[in-house]
Amino acid sequence: MAFSSPTLISMILWLFRTFVSSIICFFIGFLGLKILDLITLDIKEFKTIKGKPIPTSLFVGGFIIFTALIVHGSAISPIFLGQSPMLGDFINLQRLFLVILSIFISLFFGWLFYYVFAKVSPFQIDLDDINQSPEAIGIFLFSYEIFLGLIIHAVLTMPF
């Protein structure tokens, strides 16, 4: 099957936009995880799971799901890049702003969740108790990565 030159260029640009969007979201998500580590002062996420196979595999598994959600969202609607295959329409600043804003919203909810469960204790559960088990911290990170991936995926697939 032969493709015409404009079709081939459109396909290559679509793949490139998907790749660039995915890489940018990946690094924004990585930054979000580092900020989460700073927000949750009493939980030492990365120090605790280091060298332990089950928590590390939970973290990596969560990151794989996070990455899959980003790649899927980017393939459907590349984030920072316009929907036209023309080079002049390549950057979509509205979507870039929304992705960055969604990271801050997820971090705010992460902090709020941590504050309510660790400091206010409405259910008499101390969130800082997860420090006692590296597996619990792995599950916490796994869950947050999926939460973050779903938020970014929603922004990526939002119609404009």
Image: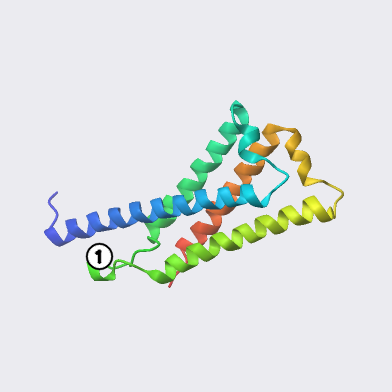
Q: Helix, strand or loop at disc 1?
A: loop
Which residue is drawn at the image coordinates 28% and 57% (left, top)? 14
In the visual, does 146 lie left or right of 6?
right
| 8 w.r.t. 142: above or below | below
**Residue 159 location, quadrant:** bottom left
In the visual, does 9 lie left or right of 153?
left
Q: Position of residue 25 (x, y in %)?
A: 44, 54
Q: How is the image coloured?
A: rainbow
| 82 w.r.t. 63: above or below | below
Task: Tally the numbered discs.
Answer: 1
Which residue is drawn at the image coordinates 31% and 57% (left, top)? 17
Query: Which is nearer the eye, 32 or 99?
Result: 32
Is residue 70 visible to the viewer in this orientation of the structure?
yes
What quarter of the picture does the C terminus occupy?
bottom left
Residue lying furthest right: 124
**Residue 24 location, quadrant:** bottom left
The kind of residue on which mark 1 rests is: Pro
Crowd class of label 1 (few under 14; some 14 to 19; many from 20; radius 10 Å): some
Is residue 86 visible to the viewer in this orientation of the structure?
no
Which residue is drawn at the image coordinates 68% and 32% (left, top)? 134
In the visual, does 37 lie left or right of 133?
left
Query: Which is nearer the eye, 31 or 63?
Result: 31
Which residue is drawn at the image coordinates 39% and 51% (left, top)? 23
Q: Which residue is mark 1?
A: 85
Q: Position of residue 106 (x, y in %)?
A: 60, 59
Q: Position of residue 74 (x, y in %)?
A: 40, 56
Q: Position of residue 34 (x, y in %)?
A: 56, 48
